[in-house]
Amino acid sequence: MSKLPIFKSVEGHHHAVPFFLCRENCGDVGFEIAGGKIDHLLNQDVADVHSHNVDEYYLLISPNEGAAEIEVHIDGVVTRHTSPDVIHVPAGKPHKFVTRKVETGTFCFGIFVGEG
Amino acid sequence: MSKLPIFKSVEGHHHAVPFFLCRENCGDVGFEIAGGKIDHLLNQDVADVHSHNVDEYYLLISPNEGAAEIEVHIDGVVTRHTSPDVIHVPAGKPHKFVTRKVETGTFCFGIFVGEG
């Protein structure tokens, strides 16, 4: 497989987004997995509030259970999620997330359903 | 979302397999994500050689790039992969993997395409 991640631009994101599984390395499998480590992003927004035209699932994981927390904003509603967790962002809903607690080796993946 | 992971039995695996994203917590999205931390599995098989009736992708990640390596056996062919990497296991192909290098916080996810 290609050297990972593969950087692609995603609407609403400040920087090119790293992809691990996408059309470019895996063909059309029905979803794409982006994201990466967030341990350097405490109290930072990864992106402006934005929306996608497909459902997205965040997968939040960290070496130690409970060691990471993200604040998820979806359509103006704020919830807080502790690792490990999966959070559904419905297609078309304006959203962003902010890292509120983190440890080295924490990852947050965004899985785009129907992409790829 | 439900408390994660959700344990389910998978043919060929020695123990119930932890799922993070699956039909039970996310409905039918076209794939399921299983797996978890492998930092306790150095030089161990996670499962007997087995096959699935759907394509699978392994996603190998670790806090530090290059800190984890898995030996992937697919249909008798052995390859070695360094984190981060994605490895495709075609539907029906007998496979297993063995962790050959690891650090705390290393994860290996198995993404089953067409499940869920």
Image (tube, coloured by chain):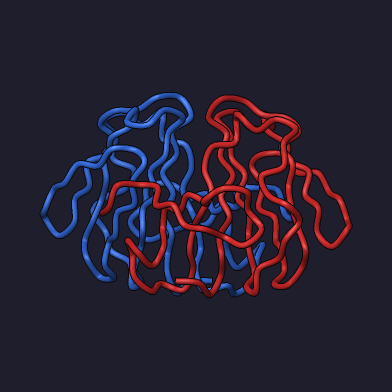
Chain colours: A blue, B red
Q: Is residue B44 left or right of residue A107?
A: right
Q: In which quarter of the image is the N terminus of chain B?
A: bottom left
Image coordinates of residue B94 in percent, x first then y, are 77, 63
Q: Residue furthest left?
A: A76
Image coordinates of residue A97 in percent, x first then y, are 27, 45
Q: Is residue A70 left or right of residue A35?
A: left
Q: Is residue B12 above or below residue B59?
A: below
Which corner quadrant of the image does residue A10 belong to? bottom left
Q: Quadrant of the C terminus of chain B?
A: bottom left
Q: Is residue B8 above or below residue B67?
A: below
The residue lying at 29 percent from left, 70 percent from top is A91
The residue lying at 43 percent from left, 33 percent from top is A62
Image coordinates of residue B48 in percent, x first then y, are 73, 52
The residue lying at 56 percent from left, 65 percent from top is B112
Q: Which residue lies furthest to the right in this view?
A: B77
Q: Is residue B114 left or right of residue A110?
A: right
The residue lying at 29 percent from left, 28 percent from top is A101
Q: Is residue A102 left or right of residue B97?
A: left
* Foreground of the two, A111 or A15: A111
Which corner quadrant of the image does residue A56 belong to? bottom left
Q: Is residue B91 above or below residue B22?
A: below
> How many numbered marks appear?
0
Image coordinates of residue B101 in percent, x first then y, are 72, 30
* Foreground of the two, B4 or B10: B10
